[in-house]
């Protein structure tokens, strides 16, 4: 229906146009009718126009016929007059013809000349018109030729400018020429060609800076300014201008930013083996710096291709990915030198980017994390150093034979001893080689910690705190573990343990010098608030205590080994007159051992001696009461008593010596200085009272005074006494062992039974 309406409207429009043309034909001079008829033939409805023209002619014929009928008489009169005039007209015609013939004959040459002149004038006009048209067309052609040359030489932005001039200035002046129409039709294609070629140049530029980012970054990290001069940014500027002129700036900006984001992600992806060498980290940082040097330059030279928000977004992404990558890869690094080099590289990386206005605080915060890892790698390294020092030490005092050697040792370790200085050469320091070596390695560790703190923009207090905390870890963990491992070694001897105690004592005294050393290199006084203190004293005390405990344990083990050699004949009836051989050897061993304790602190030597005596007393008691010894005689008990006496006394009267042998008893002899008289004998008091009770058979006193503070046999437990008495019960039937006691007792077996019964009563009442 709509189509029908449209067709009807067009038909009415055509009819109106035809009517206008007919009126124009009717009213226009014949000479000017050509353009009107041309407009009919230019249209598509000339057939319908011819029909209308025929209809109009018929209408005019009818009107003419009507008019002729109305004026017929006048027409006849006019014809009559015309017939009269015709004769005169014929005469006039003849005269005119004759005159014309004469004129033609006479003016023939003039006509020819005039025709020639006319042709010349026509040619002149044509030439002039042609020149004018050519003058209009030549600039167009020149501009077009210039455009093609510019595109051929890849001068795309000037080409675009030329194209704009051609389109808006020159072509409109000659738009009616066919070649101009071809040019006009070709202009969009030329624009697209320029866009495509400039975009291709941009892609080449992006690929080039991707490949050369590390070189740009390397230059920036070496000298900072001028790194952008390595890059020809003209492809970006050209492409930006071209797209701006073409009204596609936003498209270009989006494309550029999208491609650079992709490149940023590639740059920020570290190689899997980056942690293996410093060059891996360096190349990674160079690429990142190169990327942001380019973007910073684009930001400041292109007026909006990238903006600060876009740069900040990229930097935040780069910062998070870089920190994550560094955390991951640096954790694989076990070489402190590589970690230190990495730290210096990160500082250079951060400082370089800071020059370009990028915030780098997070990088310095992460460096504090790497500092902890660096400290751990240092601790592992120094653990090996300490282990080698301790393993290679001979655990003997350092001998010196000259003043030069003496000064060398004193120069390595802060030691002052006026008495030692006065002694003639050769002489010995009290400590072994590992003391100055360990001390110097602690200082080397402090220097290594200080190296990491450089260029981190930390205050002196922060540096001091960092060094002290790391040094405390070195002392309390690394060195402490190394010392403990040496102390706990299976094959370590008492001499080595004694030397370790002496060494740790001197190292403990040197801690104040380490404090001073740290103060000197950090310029932070120890009295400053919040200053961390060194825990070296605790470390060396713990090591010394462990060594002391190991000495006690080692002594006890040696005593146990000697006791395993004990071979008592528990059923002997002979009364011995000297201590057992194994015990004599044991006492000799203890004397020689305690002689080594000369340089030990007094309490250590005394504690070791007391511990050994207590363990010996306990072991002898266990030996006497062990279940395997089912029976024993008084003779065996007498021999055992001799051995205990050997442990107790140092000098006896001559009569006693004749009775008990000539061995020098141990406890009273003062094997180490500092004990009060008879102090060591207290270790054997339980054994002594038990043996005295049995040998003197003083049961009446024991039973009467039991439980009293003044009891002579206060240390004798009734259970212990009963156990030993049970071992002697059966032997009294077989051996005449109690002959010396028959003065007051007739029935020895009855006596034992009676004592045993009373002991059971004591035990029973004690438990109740």
Image (spheres, rainbow, N blue to C red):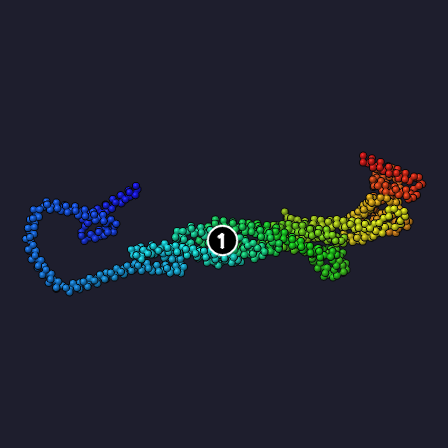
Figure check: 736 above or below 211: above
Q: Is residue 609 visible?
A: no
Q: Residue 142 in the image: state x and y as whole percent.
A: 33, 60
Nearer to me, 83 or 560: 83
Query: Does 729 sit left or right of 215 as displayed?
Result: right
Q: Residue 301 in the image: state x and y as whole percent.
A: 45, 54
Nearer to me, 82 or 374: 82
Q: Residue 329 in the image: state x and y as whole percent.
A: 58, 52
Q: Quadrant of residue 385?
A: bottom right
Query: Does 358 sit left or right of 489 as displayed?
Result: left
Q: Quadrant of residue 754?
A: top right
Query: Does 757 sit left or right of 373 as displayed?
Result: right
Residue at image coords 85%, 52%: 581
Residue position marked by numbered label 1 in the rendering = 263
Nearer to me, 41 or 716: 41
Residue furthest right in the image: 743
Count of picture labels:
1
Q: Quadrant of the N terminus?
A: top left
Q: Residue 662 in the image: state x and y as whole percent.
A: 88, 52
Residue at image coords 86%, 37%: 757
Q: Is residue 30 visible?
A: yes
Residue furthest bottom in the image: 109
Residue at image coords 34%, 54%: 185
Figure check: 112 above or below 750: below
Few, some or many C-alpha atoms within 10 Å of disc 1 (few <14, some 14-19, many ≥20)? Answer: some
Q: Secondary structure at mark 1?
A: helix
Nearer to me, 759 or 609: 759
């Amino acid at each position: 229906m709509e189509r029908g309406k449209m067709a009807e409207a067009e038909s009415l429009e055509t009819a109106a146009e035809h009517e206008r043309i007919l009126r124009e034909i009717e009213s226009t001079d014949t000479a000017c009718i050509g353009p009107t008829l041309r407009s009919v033939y230019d249209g598509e409805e000339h057939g319908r126009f011819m029909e209308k023209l025929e209809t109009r002619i018929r209408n005019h014929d009818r009107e003419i016929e009507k008019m002729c009928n109305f004026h017929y008489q006048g027409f006849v009169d006019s014809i009559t007059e015309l017939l009269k005039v015709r004769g005169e007209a014929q005469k006039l015609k003849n005269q005119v013809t004759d005159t014309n013939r004469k004129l033609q004959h006479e003016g023939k040459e003039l006509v020819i000349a005039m025709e020639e002149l006319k042709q010349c004038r026509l040619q002149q006009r044509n030439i002039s018109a042609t020149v004018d048209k050519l003058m209009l067309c030549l600039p167009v052609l020149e501009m077009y030729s210039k455009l093609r040359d510019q595109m051929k030489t890849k001068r795309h932005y000037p080409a675009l400018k030329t194209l704009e001039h051609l389109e808006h200035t020159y072509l409109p002046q000659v738009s009616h020429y066919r070649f101009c129409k071809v040019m006009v039709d070709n202009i969009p294609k030329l624009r697209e060609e320029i866009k495509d070629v400039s975009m291709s140049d941009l892609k080449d530029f992006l690929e080039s800076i991707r490949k050369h980012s590390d070189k740009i970054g390397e230059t920036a990290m070496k000298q900072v300014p001028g790194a952008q001069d390595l890059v020809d940014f003209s492809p970006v500027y050209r492409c930006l201008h071209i797209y701006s002129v073409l009204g596609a700036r936003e498209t270009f900006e989006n494309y550029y930013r999208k491609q650079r984001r992709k490149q940023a992600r590639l740059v920020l992806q570290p190689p899997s083996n980056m942690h293996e060498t410093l060059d891996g980290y360096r190349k990674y940082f160079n690429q990142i710096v190169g990327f942001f040097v380019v973007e910073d330059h684009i930001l400041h030279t292109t007026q909006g291709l990238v903006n600060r928000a876009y740069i900040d977004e990229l930097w935040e992404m780069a910062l998070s990915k870089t920190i994550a990558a560094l955390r991951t890869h640096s954790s694989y690094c076990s070489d402190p030198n590589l970690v230190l080099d990495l730290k210096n590289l990160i500082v250079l990386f951060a400082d370089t980017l800071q020059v370009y206005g990028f915030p780098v605080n997070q990088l310095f915060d992460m460096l504090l994390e790497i500092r902890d890892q660096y400290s751990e790698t240092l601790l592992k390294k120094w653990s090996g150093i300490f282990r080698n020092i301790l393993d290679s030490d001979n655990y003997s005092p350092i001998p010196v034979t000259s003043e030069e050697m003496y000064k060398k040792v004193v120069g390595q370790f802060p030691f002052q001893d006026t008495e030692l200085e006065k002694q003639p050469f050769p002489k010995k320091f009290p400590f072994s080689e590992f003391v100055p070596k360990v001390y110097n390695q602690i200082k080397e560790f402090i220097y290594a910690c200080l190296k990491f703190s450089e260029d981190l923009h930390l205050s002196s207090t922060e540096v001091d705190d960092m060094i002290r905390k790391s040094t405390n870890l070195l002392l309390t963990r690394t060195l402490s573990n190394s010392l403990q491992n040496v102390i706990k070694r299976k094959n370590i001897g008492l001499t080595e343990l004694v030397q370790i105690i002496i060494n740790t004592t001197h190292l403990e005294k040197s801690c104040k010098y380490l404090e001073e050393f740290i103060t000197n290199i950090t310029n932070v006084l120890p009295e400053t608030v919040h200053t961390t203190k060194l825990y070296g004293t605790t470390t060396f005390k713990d090591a010394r205590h462990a060594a002391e405990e190991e000495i006690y344990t080692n002594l006890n083990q040696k005593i146990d080994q000697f006791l395993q050699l004990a071979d008592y004949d528990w059923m002997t009836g002979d009364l011995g007159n000297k201590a057992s051989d194994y015990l004599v050897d044991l006492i000799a061993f203890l004397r020689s051992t305690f002689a080594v304790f000369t340089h030990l602190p007094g309490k250590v030597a005394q504690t070791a001696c007391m511990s050994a005596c207590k363990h010996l007393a306990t072991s002898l008691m266990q030996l006497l009461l062990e279940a395997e010894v089912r029976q024993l005689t008084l003779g065996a008990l007498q021999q055992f008593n001799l051995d205990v006496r050997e442990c107790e006394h140092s000098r006896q009267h001559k009569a006693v010596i004749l009775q008990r042998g000539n061995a020098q008893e141990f406890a009273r002899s003062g094997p180490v200085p500092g004990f009060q008289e008879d102090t060591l004998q207290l270790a054997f008091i339980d054994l002594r009272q038990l043996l005295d009770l049995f040998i003197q058979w003083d049961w009446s006193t024991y039973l009467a005074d039991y439980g009293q503070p003044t009891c002579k046999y206060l240390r004798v437990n009734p259970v212990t006494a009963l156990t030993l008495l049970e071992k002697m019960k059966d032997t009294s039937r077989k051996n005449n062992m109690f002959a010396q006691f028959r003065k007051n007792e007739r029935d020895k077996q009855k006596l034992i039974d009676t004592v045993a019964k009373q002991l059971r009563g004591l035990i029973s009442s004690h438990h109740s």
